[in-house]
Amino acid sequence: MNKTQGIITWLALWVAIITPLHAVAGERESLEQLRSTTVGLIEALVQEGILSKEKAEGLIRKAENARQTETGNEHALATGAALAGAANDGSVVRVQYVPEFVKQQLRADIEKDVMAKLNYHVEEERLKLPSWLDRISFEGDIRLRYEPVRFSERNASEASLGSDPSRQVMIPNSTQDQDRYRVRARFGVNAKISDWLSAGIRMTSGHMDNPLSPNQSIDIRAAKLDWGLDRVFITAKPYSWMTVSAGRFANPFFSSDMVWDRSLAFDGAAATFLPKFNDSLSGFGTIGAFPIDQVQKGALNKAEDKWILGAQAGIEWTSPNKSSAKLGLAFYDFKHVEGIANQMDGFDSRYNGTVMPYRQKGNNTFDINRSGSTVGTCGIRTTLDAYTNTGCGLASKFQVLNLTGQLDLAAFDPVHVILQGDYAVNIGFDQQEIFRRTNVLYEKENQAYQLKLIVGMPEMRERNDWQVFGAYKKLEADAVMDSFTDSDFHLGGTNAKGFILGGNYGIDKNTWLTARWLSTREITGMPLAIDVFQFDITTRF
């Protein structure tokens, strides 16, 4: 609220207060003192430039006319009372009375008149601010993190993991403990274009070649942090039960971080439907199409565009005491993400584009540039902390069926007990189809599940809000795409199982501390156990 709006609001409150006081004041001295104060306030507004001198004089004249009218009414009432008193006992009685409906009408008229004049002056004569500013809102948050990473002594070396015949685990470090200092910053602008149309953009920190984590390690050597456009979208809501978004926007599906990392942006278009059956029961559904990698096809490039096609349907029940239950079933079809082998070793690159442009680790892969029954080593170390993904084609197709549920018990509100469950199976995994395409027979590892319990406030908003949580997760190698799953659990990827423990505590409004412990290890293949600790302070505005 700016200074002008504050003065206007204060003036309206003052008028509302002094009117009833004026009506019940028993003495003329009190009335004159209140009048003098009001006139002084109007003169102060003139000095501030909020009211013109002409408008101020008009307000004072109107108040003076009302005072004279009231004085005349009071005189008539007093005269009548005096006559009545004189008739009874010969004494004179002074009576001062204003009916309640007159007081209310005076209060409403004065407030309406003053606010109308001031608002007109502020909006059109002095500030001259465009009306679209009222439709703009801002949001953002900052998170600082200390993240110790501890590797087990039993772990295989990164070189051994990279040459694993069952899968190439492209991890830069598997044995040396690390302490990372990280930051995440986000800032967004949302605009309400009309009653049914809105748009927004959001900037975020993070490396530009990583579609998941917005975290960035900080040190003086880095000089400046990367800052990029993470959201850019238009949203239409033609009906109360239908929303359509296009561009780059937040995850439109009801899901956990088992399939989709919490920070992943979805590029493309999605439509969400929210039918309401009665006061306690409603449904939801979402359909969408999202490009992963659009390739330039030609004689030397036979790869197809990679897409995600998603559909979800579900139901939600809400009780009068705020408890709720929600269940959703989704199907995600990942188009053309599987690798295709080049036909001639070293002389053919037509199917290089079938390799996923970004991966974490865990999915079974094969070297698209090698023929025969040897899987080969397709990960090539390029720097001290990075591997390329050149030549590592995914062995399996991915068609993921995902069941997600949540039970929120609010019997002890504001403390909630929330139980979440997630199950996913890749029905696109086909051993025989994979063998025909890769000439390698892979074990069937295509299921994942997660259970999570949360006790406390559902969201961190106020000081002393708290929350504790625990979860167990298991992701087999080809259950979900390692490119898009949680980037913190097992330092990203699949072929991992383990637990998560932690809590949040609000230290002020929209500011809270977080502590988490993620302890994981491999399911199959070479040994890789990782403990990740995260200590955060987050503030939101």
Image (cartoon, grey):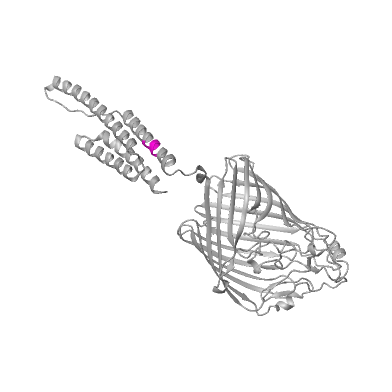
- Is the magenta region chiefly helix, strand or loop? helix
Residue 329 appears at what percent x and percent y?
70, 51
Query: In the visual, does 7 lie left or right of 487?
Result: left
Q: Quadrant of residue 368?
A: bottom right
Question: In x, y percent, where is residue 349?
Answer: 83, 66
Q: Is 327 positioned to the left or the right of 19 in the image?
A: right
Residue 318 in view: yes
Residue 27 in view of the camera: no
Q: Nearer the viewer, residue 317 or 494?
A: 494
* 126 is higher (above) or lower (below) than 138: above
Q: Is residue 509 above or below residue 346?
A: above
| For residue 438, side relative to residue 509 (left or right) | right
- In the visual, does 355 lie left or right of 59? right
Q: Position of residue 226 (x, y in %)?
A: 59, 65
Q: Position of residue 254 (x, y in %)?
A: 65, 52
222 or 277: nearer the eye?
A: 222
Identity of the residue drawn at 74% across and 62% down: 479
Query: Among all residues in the image, which is located at the extreme bottom?
Result: 153
Point out the stretch of residues depicted in magenta: 114-118
In the picture as drawn, the residue positioned furthest to the top comes out as 87
Q: Give the vertical position of 422 relative to 518 (above or below).
A: above
Q: Is residue 52 magenta?
A: no
Q: Quadrant of residue 251?
A: bottom right
Task: Identify which residue, 449 or 135, lies in the foreground.
Answer: 135
The tally of labels here is 0
